[in-house]
Amino acid sequence: GAGVSQSPRYKVAKRGQDVALRCDPISGHVSLFWYQQALGQGPEFLTYFQNEAQLDKSGLPSDRFFAERPEGSVSTLKIQRTQQEDSAVYLCASSSWDEYEQYFGPGTRLTVT
Amino acid sequence: RKEVEQDPGPFNVPEGATVAFNCTYSNSASQSFFWYRQDCRKEPKLLMSVYSSGNEDGRFTAQLNRASQYISLLIRDSKLSDSATYLCVVKPLTGTASKLTFGTGTRLQVTL
């Protein structure tokens, strides 16, 4: 079946612009996660949804980062007033109710110039 | 100190060699342990879970030592296709149980 999809795959933004990154999880998966992966590093947790409820946003680096999942399926990660340090790959993952394995999407590579 | 520490490598080994990666974690309350594989410019994919009793999947053997907070991955008879970054991952017991904490990854390059 279809895996996790993310769009856009690549995004170039000028410093100060707002960006919105989309994640389509695997159908029926209640849990959705966002991670940020800087070059040469492992992914770092940003935020977690169970259905439409955002249960943990402790990893969001600043109040410029905002995530939503209004209908419990598609999620959007928004970054306001982008900075160069926001340049990274943003990975979305989803898992089923038993939350054993997280399935990752291909990521959105964000470059802030 | 990072919660999960790995030697970033790279490990350059000839085809057919045996190679071992190690990882240490700092949170003694960690609940579950995994190795993920990440190919260049691709997403991480689960390679295998890690259990205290040790577990094997073909050429791959994973081991967990809770007392030492140490996780290992052994790859026997390396193939060219094993070239990738191997990420050590722990899942915490408290807070958001499902959040994954990744190490920086160990890069493996298998050569002819």
Image (spheres, coloured by chain):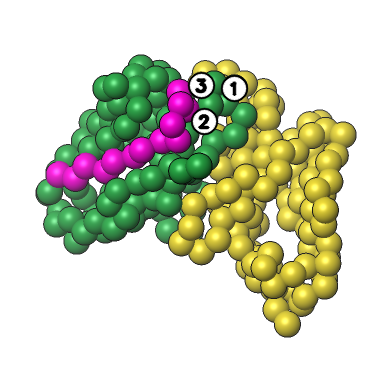
- Front position among marks 3 and 1: 1
Chain depicted in green = A
Label 3 vs label 1: CA separation? 14 Å
Same chain shared by disc 3 and disc 1: no
Same chain shared by disc 2 and disc 1: yes
Marked residue chain, label 2: A
Same chain shared by disc 3 and disc 2: no
Residue A37 location in percent, x, y? 43, 49
Chain depicted in yellow = B
Marked residue chain, label 1: A
Q: Amino acid at mark 2?
A: Ser
Q: Secondary structure at mark 1?
A: loop
Q: Secondary structure at mark 2?
A: strand
Badge 1: how crowded within 10 Å, few (<14), some, or many (20+)? Answer: few
* Residue A58 is inside the magenta segment: no
Label 2 vs label 1: CA separation? 8 Å
Q: Amino acid at mark 3?
A: Thr
Could one spot residue A110 in this view of the protein? no
Looking at the rendering, the stretch of residues picked out in magenta corresponds to: A18-30
Residue at x 80% of width, y 48% of height: B57
Label 3 vs label 2: CA separation? 14 Å
Q: Which residue is under mark 2? A: A95
Q: Which mark is residue A98?
A: 1
Residue at x 71% of width, y 43% of height: B48
Residue lying furthest bottom in this view? B112
Q: Secondary structure at mark 3?
A: loop
Q: Which residue is under mark 3? A: B96
